[in-house]
Image (spheres, rainbow, N blue to C red):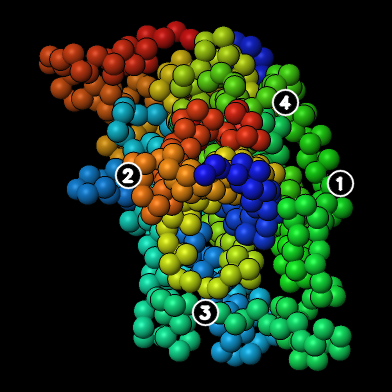
Amino acid sequence: MGVDFWQILMNGAVELISPTTAAYALAALGLAIHFGYTGLLNFGQAGFMAIGAYGFAISTLTFQFPVWAAVLVGVGASVVFALILGVPTLRLRADYLSIVTIAAAEILRLIFTTNTFDPVTGSANGLSGYKGSYGDPVTREGAWGFAGLNPFPKGSYGFGPWVMDEYNFFLTIVAWVIVILAALLTWQLMRSPWGRVIKGIREDEDAVRALGKNVYFYKMQSLILGGVFGTLAGMIFILPRAVVPSNYATTLTFFIYTILLLGGAATILGPVVGSIIFWVLLSIVSGFIARAQGAGWLPFLSSVQAGQLRFIIVGVVLMLLVIFRPQGIFGNKKELAFVK
Amino acid sequence: MSSNATPSKGAPVKSTGLHVGEPAPGVAKVDPIIVADNVTRTFGGLKAVDVAHLEIPRNAITALIGPNGAGKTTLFNLLTGFDKPDTGTWTFAGTSLAGVPSFKVARLGQVRTFQLTKALGLLTVLDNMKLGAKNQKGENLFRALLPFLWRKQEEEIEAKALDILQRFKLDAKVEDYAASLSGGQRKLLEMARALMSDPTLVMLDEPMAGVNPALTQSLLDHILDLKTQGMTVLFVEHDMHMVRHIADWVVVMAEGRVVAEGPPHDVMKQQAVIDAYLGSHHDQDLGATESENVEAMKELLHDED
């Protein structure tokens, strides 16, 4: 029994443009605004993603909101979440924000997991059935939700490893269009005077305060903007799968940090390319380990252990990155060193 | 009230006739820009600042001196809104500033620099400068997305920044990161950046600390130049030579209080000042720890300028 390297590569190629890759890229872009540009240590990006996921799913399932309203509910909830986090902590030193955000994200996840709200949140089983329906293939009778917005006829799209049905094709396009728009928005903001204030705050907020800028207000805007990106990412993330509360544990935040540091924390392209590299490599590595284990090349590992090995590798890569290339792939070493 | 000085090397023209009546702690000024009353700040049991009354003269250079721990920087922080006092009121150009946050104080035209220089290291020198400009349209999150709204203003700000940088001889460094500047250049940049907001009062916290002697004269000239341009300067400094050289008025603090005030050459001869630096038992053995203050005092008394 050999290992089909071609198949492993093809599976990796699928991740290149998958909606999940787009979702992580968007969440990492939000974190780039927080951490890379403003210097806010937000360790609760998973919480913002959970708000997007649950905000969208609950609005759709429990309240039968149309897609645009469900998106607005998620975004509105994340603005409120950012305000709740920011009002008490943004006046304090950066490390306090990190403690509060990591705790707040966990609180959210536990609220979504608890049985008390089972009818609405689905507790530990999560939620599904919010994707909507394409309706009748011709008349579109009965179309609703996200799938109902699909303008493409039913069928198969793409080529090579990227062959997908009309739902995933539509979702992939929507996801990457959102990522591109968010990247352009961030790019424009960071070359504006607003971005200059934000980067100044990263360097020394007292100096910026002494120049007459309302630092607290700018930090709040940054927290909200990056959080909304995370929330939109949370919505994209759940459209190819179901909402499962355990997905929003702190590991999600750390994967996004890995992506951010891989690409470069104070860059626009960094989070996007970082996410692509992360997912393609993760797919190839886990595909290889699983097949190698199946082929008996790794006799010292059980199949369960082999499944976990890839995350050990992610952790090691993160450590190596921070030590040897703190500015990431795209970062300018002079502009952002992880340790000043 | 004052004769304006032109910065000529060696002997700047001092502003005189700033006060009303005999120079004493809390003496009234002819034209005060800052009037502070009953400002106190305690840290635990220590009364760091306890100023009953203080007036800072307009369009003059006032030095705030005193031994280490006298409360100079704390008073600075209070006046600029970076710290909150336990009690007290003060006005800046007639506006009450008690309880006003630091960024609003800066917007009113009272800018400060810091004892430990705060150049924004990973921004370019030019971006550091541009950040100092006030009322920027593009600093609003939504207008930032529409460059045509702020591009013209941005060009004006850039021209102004380049002009000031040229005066400060930093124009060759425009595109460099501020982190690559030397300590003295960072002090210059911080002062230049403060000027971008067209302040009326410039507050410098130890502008000479850590500055290469070669840059000292240039920094002094820039400070004198601020007065020529109609600004008021208040600075904290340990370098007595500099204080004598450029200050029009000296306020001496010790243990949180203002213990003496007056023109530089007179004030340094007062008993209260000698006591502040040397302790009232200065005829007794001081021990090695006091040697720094002794040196400062020797400079005060014997420096012939």
**Total labels drawn:** 4
Tell me, for residue A127, which label it has, or none.
3
Q: Amino acid at mark 3?
A: Leu
Q: Are marks 2 and 4 in contact (CB under 8 Å)?
A: no
Amino acid type for the residue under numbered disc 4:
Val
Give the SS element for disc 3. Answer: loop
Horizontal arrangement in the rendering, residue A309 relative to residue B104 (left or right): left
Is the same chain shared between marks 3 and 2?
Answer: no
Nearer to me, A322 or B77: A322
- Horizontal and vertical percent for residue A211? 60, 44
Asked whether the residues under the numbered discs 3 and 2 touch, taking CB atoms below 8 Å apart as contact, a structural biologist would say no
Under mark 1, the amino acid is: Lys
The structure residue drawn at horizontal position 41% and vertical position 76%, both measured from the top left corner, is A124
Give the image location of residue B77, x and y in percent.
43, 44
Residue at mark 1 to residue at mark 2: CA–CA distance = 46 Å
The residue where tag 4 is placed is: B174
Graded by Cα atoms within 10 Å as few (under 14), some (14 to 19) or many (20 or more), the crowding at tag 2 reads many
Tell me which residue sits at (43%, 67%) in the image. Answer: A246
Left of B270 or right of it: where is B2?
Answer: right
The nearer-to-camera label among 4 and 3 is 3
* Dots 2 and 4 on the same chain: yes
Task: Identify the residue under disc 1.
Answer: B152
Q: Residue at x 60, y 25 (%)?
A: B188
Circles 1 and 3 on the same subunit: no
Residue A336 on image: x %, y %? 57, 34
Residue under pointer 2: B49
Closer to the chain start, of discs 2 and 4, is: 2
Do the dots labelled 1 and 2 sit on one chain?
yes
Residue A21, percent across and down? 64, 55
Quarter of the figure with residue A36: top right
Q: Which amino acid, mark 2?
A: Val
